[in-house]
Amino acid sequence: MDVLVALIVVALIAIAIYLGLTAIAHREPPAPTWTVSTRSLQDGTTIVSVRSDHGEERIREIPPSLQGDALAAALRSARAEAQARADELNRLEED
């Protein structure tokens, strides 16, 4: 009888450990703190920046004179640069 009780206790401990490790493995990573933001000022200037609760870091200001393909290329480039910076800042906050 004592052996049966010991086996049940060991099995319950093993199940608890398994469930705990499974919960840790399936936990979603936290949302990034720094995100890319694009906004326009009243004068038409487009601001590409990274933002968080800590503030804002401007990456690039795109003048209102750019249009068409030049504007699209400048926006793509600025947003890629901003995403790289946001990733870097998020990595620094994790450490």
Image (cartoon, rainbow, N blue to C red):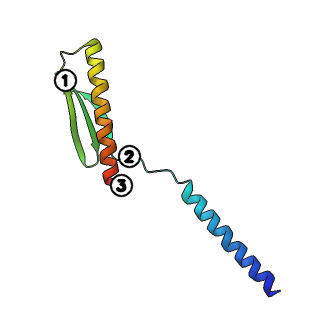
Please, what secondary structure does the residue beneath circle 2 have?
loop
| Residue 76 percent coordinates (x, y) | 32, 25
State the residue at coordinates (80%, 81%): 4
Q: Nearer the viewer, residue 70 or 35?
A: 70
Mark 3, Cα crowd under 10 Å, few <14 / some 14-19 / many 20+, is: few
Q: Is residue 43 above or below residue 27?
A: above
67 w.r.t. 6: above or below: above
Q: Residues within 10 Å of mark 2 (few under 14, many from 20)?
A: some
Asked whether the residues under the numbered discs 2 and 3 touch, taking CB atoms below 8 Å apart as contact, a structural biologist would say no
Q: Position of residue 62 (x, y in %)?
A: 20, 24
How far apart are the two marked residues, 3 and 1, measured between alpha carbons? 33 Å
- The quadrant where residue 34 appears: top left
Give the answer, above or below, for where 2 lies relative to 47.
below
- Circle nearer the viewer, 2 or 1: 2
User: Can you tell which quarter of the image residue 78 is in?
Assistant: top left
Q: Is residue 28 left or right of residue 44?
A: right
Mark 2 / mark 3, whichever is N-terminal: 2
Look at label 1 and name its amino acid: Thr
Q: Nearer the viewer, residue 88 or 26?
A: 88
| Dot label at residue 45 | 1
Q: Three-letter amino acid code at disc 2? A: Pro
Is 53 placed left or right of 5 in the picture? left
Secondary-structure class at tag 1: loop
Q: Secondary structure at mark 3?
A: helix
- The residue pinned by badge 2 equals 32
